[in-house]
């Protein structure tokens, strides 16, 4: 039986005939792993904690940054610089001391994924990169674990449930990752602050339904949300049985096209931060092009001419083809894509991408 404290805390669940004592017991016995304690992870963790999910794992290797505070609602200004898993654990434990938490302040990869995921009933993906999404999917398939997926982009969100009772997987919906540079993350393109809360709450709802056994789960369906029009739509997709036969991991950086290789470097010459700093000191005929968004340039720049990537083709007249040119962005992804565009118009010009972008310059 539940204690008086539990009866009071979960009272609004207990009086729902569809949940009641038995449903709350299922929540109490359940274990859920949250991959990522960022924009999506924060509301998911808060609502799973409030609902009384018995064991919650929190996996994230990152630290709180000031730019997180616009949408990652578990953190405040005093948390900047602290590990997200530590702050989340501390605040969630205060929210519900009846829940057991396990923290993993590490990056999920091929060496630890199976060992970490095997102890949980349900896995929730709140990551922001395709390498992790494919890795988590493949681990869930190998372990037979259901996966609750969510993603956000500017004003749009997606939610689905994979690998649930033999349903389709992430690879059934997205057999191949998008081309590198075509899907910027929120640090590069921005995101409506409230959007992760909306999508995260939908993910949390799917988790609770799966644990208790309520309603219809979003298996074989992708729910789409547009915050600008407040419209929801659903896309159905089918299981590809071959995607259930995954037996081993792949190199996800190579698969997603993000690993540096001689091919990338030959196609797009790169220059290191140290080399560029020396060039700036010695070469007065050097052209710097910043292909980030205008607001990113205003917040921090190294003096380059700002031409956002999406405006580049219409602003080619701003490029001096007779100067050695270094193109940079935040992480080096958009700059490489920009150089492909520039090379098609100025094949004789020497273009270089700043290796790892301005994040390396700041470091």
Image: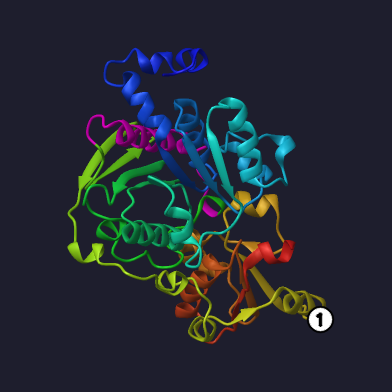
Determine whether, in the image, residue 69 is placed left or right of residue 140.
right
**Residue 114: within the magenta?**
no
In the picture shown, does residue 347 fall above or below 252?
A: below
Q: Position of residue 304 (x, y in %)?
A: 68, 65
Q: Position of residue 249 (x, y in %)?
A: 39, 70
Residue occupying the far right of the picture: 281
In the picture shown, does residue 123 fall above or below 12?
A: below
In the picture shown, does residue 46 fall above or below 173?
A: above
Identify the residue at horizontal 67%, vertical 62% (top origin): 359
Determine whether, in the image, residue 218 is placed left or right of residue 143.
left
Work out whether residue 150 can be spotted: no
> For this rendering, which residue is in front, 141 or 38?
141
Label 1 neighbour load within 10 Å: few <14, some 14-19, many 20+: few
In the picture shown, does residue 356 fall above or below 146?
A: below
Q: Position of residue 176 (x, y in %)?
A: 32, 66
Determine whether, in the image, residue 321 is placed left or right of residue 130.
right
Q: Which residue is mark 1?
A: 282
Label tally: 1
Give the magenta range: 188-216
Q: Quadrant of residue 130?
A: bottom left
Say which element carries label 1: helix
Image quarter where the C terminus lies is bottom right
Identify the residue at horizontal 61%, vertical 43% (top origin): 68
Q: Quadrant of residue 330?
A: bottom right
Q: Position of residue 64 (x, y in %)?
A: 66, 45
> For this rendering, which residue is in front, 237 or 302?
237
Identify the residue at horizontal 52%, vertical 72% (top origin): 336
Residue occupying the far front of the picture: 1
């Amino acid at each position: 039986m539940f204690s008086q404290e539990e009866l009071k805390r979960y009272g609004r669940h207990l009086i729902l005939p569809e949940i009641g004592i038995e449903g709350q017991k299922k929540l109490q016995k359940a274990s859920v792993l949250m991959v990522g304690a960022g924009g999506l992870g924060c509301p998911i963790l808060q609502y799973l904690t409030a609902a009384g999910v018995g064991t919650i794992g929190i996996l994230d290797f990152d630290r709180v940054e000031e730019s997180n505070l616009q949408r990652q609602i578990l953190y405040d200004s005093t948390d900047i610089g602290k590990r997200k898993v530590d702050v989340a654990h501390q605040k969630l434990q205060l929210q519900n001391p009846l829940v057991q938490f396990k923290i993993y302040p590490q990056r999920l990869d091929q060496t630890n994924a199976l060992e970490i995921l095997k102890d949980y009933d349900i896995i929730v993906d709140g990551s922001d990169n395709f390498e992790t999404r494919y890795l988590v999917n493949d681990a869930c398939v190998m372990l037979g674990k259901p996966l609750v997926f969510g993603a956000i982009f500017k004003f749009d969100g997606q939610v689905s449930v994979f690998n649930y009772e033999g349903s389709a997987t992430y690879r059934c919906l997205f057999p191949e990752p998008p081309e590198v540079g075509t899907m910027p993350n929120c640090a590069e393109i921005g995101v409506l602050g409230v959007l992760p809360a909306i999508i995260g709450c939908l993910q949390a709802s799917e988790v609770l339904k799966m644990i208790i056994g309520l309603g219809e789960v979003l298996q074989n369906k992708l729910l789409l949300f547009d915050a600008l029009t407040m419209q929801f739509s659903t896309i159905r997709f089918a299981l590809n049985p071959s995607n259930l036969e995954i037996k081993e991991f792949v190199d996800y950086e190579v698969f997603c096209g993000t690993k540096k290789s001689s091919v990338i470097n030959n196609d797009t010459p790169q220059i290191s931060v140290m080399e560029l700093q020396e060039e700036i000191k010695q070469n007065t005929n050097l052209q710097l092009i910043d292909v980030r968004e205008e607001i990113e340039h205003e917040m921090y720049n190294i003096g380059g001419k700002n031409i956002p990537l999406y405006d580049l083709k219409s602003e080619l007249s701003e490029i001096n083809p007779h100067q050695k040119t270094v193109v940079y962005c935040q992480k080096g992804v958009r700059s490489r894509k920009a150089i492909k565009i520039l090379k098609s118009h100025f094949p004789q010009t020497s273009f270089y991408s700043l290796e790892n972008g301005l994040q390396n310059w700041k470091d």
